[in-house]
Amino acid sequence: MDVFETACQRAVAYRSEVANHPVKPQLDYHQMRARFAEPLPETGIPDCAVINELADRGEAGLMPITHPRFFGWVMGASAPVSVAADWLAAAWGQNAAMHSATPTAAAVEETAAGWLLEVLDLPREAAVGFVTGATAGSFAALAAARGALLRRSGWDCEADGLFGAPEVHVFISDDLHASVLSALRYLGFGERRVIRVDTDSEGRMLADDLARHCAGCDGPKLIIAQAGQINTGAFDPFARLADIAHENDAWLHVDAAFGLWARAVPELRSLTEGIERADSWVVDGHKWLQVPFDSGYAIVRDADALQRSMAICASYLPPQGVSDRPPSYLVPELSRKARGLPTWAALKSLGRSGVTAMVRQHCGLARQIAADLAQVPGISVMNDVVLNQVILRFGDDTDSAEQRKALATAVMDRVVADGTIFVAGAAWRGEWVMRISVISGAISDEDVAITTGAIRAAWTHVLGNAPSETAVSR
């Protein structure tokens, strides 16, 4: 099996050196497309040669997401132990749909699910579906919500579909993540039919506005809140939202792709007060848990509701007892890899204290970045840094929004071109901001100093070249 050794050697070489290279791809998409464009081979080549050629051609176009100074989006750095477990999952070649077909995959996944509920302190009776990420997680959890809400109104949507079904009123935050809107669209709710609830300056849902909207609607109600707003890191007021949901017999779902991990840190837990009263949650493993991509969790308090919405049954499939947590009854796929293995490995390696320490460290480093850069004239921290997200505005109030956008764009272009850090922009409250997501498992105090130094230097450079680079006269 020399091909496995070749792949391992190339992977180890890449990961060993990633922190010593610029935090950007060397070649862009068009260059990589040209590099890989070729006719289908008539005859094959040896397996080891295939892997070496793939690495030789492909590494120049890799985004170094595992670099400690990658801040572009909320993406974890794929810890080595979970990557290794992911290799085993692929090498073992298990389809994790059924107990009888893949006992190890099912058992490991069940244990990992219990550990997740424990470290996140969610209801221990909840079902956990191992999905690809937050979008699929929201799809699964909201499908369970749709079915449960309609059954309360005497309608079985799993059997009879949605034609003629009672209308489900969906209430979302005005600053909800786009992945939830995608899940709602897949489920037939549509984007324009949702009821948008006002938010405050940090993106938190306003409970009074939600209560007002709920009072004006009759019929089944689905409320979608969030833990960790994608720009500010803010948390909705879950205790109050849970009260409103209870008063309206509504289902409360929480998009908590990365914010739910705050429950693992005692001093951050208050941010999530009341979140345990929700009916469903979605959280990613490929964010703070540092599990490779293709890892998310749909968590639903009512296990029966999730199983009724997701179950796949056929005569040729082995029978599965519902009480035994059939894996194919918890996710929208019958064929899938053993996703529980990397999660099990990550939690086994970190332990509860390791998860706590990592989240605590990252949030502390985010506050440090914000504090350092807030001292720089012309740079403004635009959010209350309650978690790991920092958003920066460049320019003063005397500049127009267009001028500030040009300045921010110029700074980001400068730091990305330099390759010391990778950041990305976002629109927030009429401003174009630099967004810094501190979530790489390998980040250190030294990386923070390098990061703030790079941003300071880029800002100084942009100010010195403002007339030519930004058309701003300062």
Image (cartoon, rainbow, N blue to C red):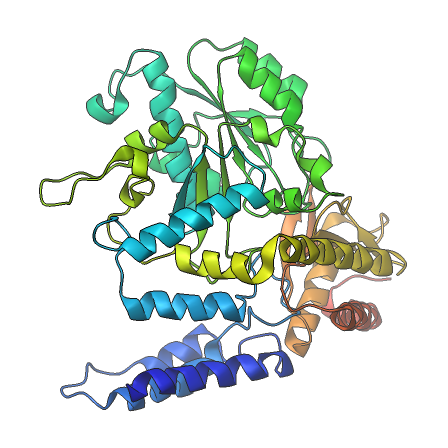
Estimate the x, y position of residue 178 in percent, counting from the top left. Answer: 50, 42
Residue 440 appearing in the image: yes
The residue closer to the viewer here, 202 or 90, is 90
Residue 424 higher or lower than 183, as above or below: below
Q: Is residue 73 visible?
A: no
Count of numbered circles in the view: 0
Query: Residue at (39%, 47%) from the top-left corner?
Result: 110
Rendered location of residue 43, percent (x, y): 14, 88
> In which quarter of the view is residue 16 placed?
bottom right
| Residue closer to the observer: 296 or 470 | 296
Does 189 appear above or below 429?
above
Q: Quadrant of the N terminus?
A: bottom left
Residue 326, x across and y down, in percent: 29, 41
Seen at 77% across and 55% down, the residue is 364
Coordinates of residue 259 in the picture (x, y in percent): 62, 44
* 454 on left or right of 316: right
Quadrant (top left, top right, bottom left, bottom right) of the C terminus = bottom right
Q: Residue furthest left?
A: 315
Foreground residue, 141 or 25?
141
Looking at this view, is 301 or 75 the one in front? 301
Q: Is residue 51 left or right of residue 374?
A: left
Q: Residue at left 35%, top 88%?
A: 53
Please identify the quarter of the rendering in which residue 18 is found.
Answer: bottom right
Q: Quadrant of residue 430?
A: top right
